[in-house]
Image (tube, rainbow, N blue to C red):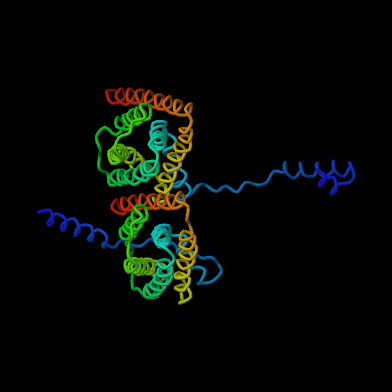
Amino acid sequence: MMRTIFRLVSAVVVLLIAIPSPAHAHLTNTGLGPFYDGVAHLLLTLSDLLPIIALSLLAGLRGPRFGRVALFALPISCFGASLAGLFAASQWALPAASAAATIVLGALVAANTRVPLRVVAVLAILLGLLAGALNGIELVTAPASALAAIGVAAAPFVMVAILAGHVSSLRASWARIAVRVAGSWIAAVGLLMLGWAIRGT
Amino acid sequence: MKAVRNVFPCERARHLGTFVLLLFLACPAALFGHPRGGEALGFASGFQHPMSGLDHVLAMIAVGLWGAQLGSPAIWMLPVTFPMVMALGGMLGLMGLRLPGVEICIAVSAIVLGFAVLREARPKLWIAAIIVGFFAIFHGHAHGSELPPGADGLLYSVGFVIATGCLHATGIGIGVVHRWPIGRTSLRVAGAIVCLAGVAFLWRAIASGIA
């Protein structure tokens, strides 16, 4: 009985997350060319940025090895997906998917879950695919090129390098607790993002 | 001062410098009006929302104070629990789900949390987390259903989560005095004040409900 309910709830959640909605493209024109447009587009899209921050914190809490995996897995998948997104025929967004990623990653940081290396790698690849695709699709109307896709991938590379590197060097228990508190805040914002996505505004 | 004297060796030159500086400061410039857009309005109103209601402020500071009294791990566990459950309440508010007696429960939260600080109550950690989490739903619901028109929803959410965290941190910061005997007494007095304020909020909530 419980297993049936669990499966039903999971199916509803997956359905909600997978429902696409029209994208509200917000082109970022830095005036410095497509590379920096790509960088700025991701850095200025809070819904994409928060799960990346959460993943960086998670990898940092687990240690340098995890940080190194996230450092390359996330930008590479992000680059591939943003390239694919640039050639997308129509614009769409998955606001609930971004919210779900934010909730899951934030909660993992808050709980200081001892996730295995493979799981971190899979999470980084999935997040990279999501963030890359969403950013690539939104950049499609701009004078985009592969340089924009490189910019979209460069932003998370820098984010992970700085955040995961810094967090993995933290030794004081209060500092690691502060990271976990930040994770809980990110998860909280993710829950509200999900509320906004369901509300549809 | 010596450096200033070196730059302006002559008294008259120093006066002249001061005069020019004042002239610059007093110079009026054309104002480039920039009405606050959705983003600025969203973050600012989200940040101000928990601070604008005394009932929210006192309850959240009381969470921090109680955490400080309970010590580790409650000192950080309660402030971690509160925003996450509060966001759940906010999500319900955003989705338009109505909760009965939100204002009454917010007032009761101040009473219960204030009383816990007053008595320096030491329940098991999971019980404390459930108490805090239960009331967090109502605080979150109030925030989630009161988004001002035209505000950016995501930044509003970020604003009120950060503000809530800052209020908890304030409570924890005040709670540091718990290590001294006079500090412990002061915290209990603070708990009594929060509790009494909660009674006043409850009175107001019931009165406005009847009216």
Residue A98 location (% of width, % of height): 34, 60
Residue A91 visible (yes or no): no
Q: Is residue B32 above or below residue A26?
A: above
Q: Is residue A165 above or below residue B48?
A: below
Instruction: Residue B57: name its quadrant.
Output: top left
Instruction: Residue B164: name its quadrant.
Output: top left
Location of the N terminus of chain B (image quadrant)? top right
Q: Residue at x 47, y 27 (%)?
A: B181
Name the side, left or right, on which B18 lies relative to B153: right
Location of the C terminus of chain B (image quadrant)? top left
Q: Residue at x 41, y 24 (%)?
A: B193
Residue A11 visible (yes or no): yes
Residue B127 location (% of width, % of height): 27, 38
Closer-to-camera residue (A32/A171) = A171
Residue A114 location (% of width, % of height): 33, 59
Residue B26 location (% of width, % of height): 72, 41
Instruction: Residue A117: name its quadrant.
Output: bottom left
Q: Residue at x 42, y 37 (%)?
A: B68
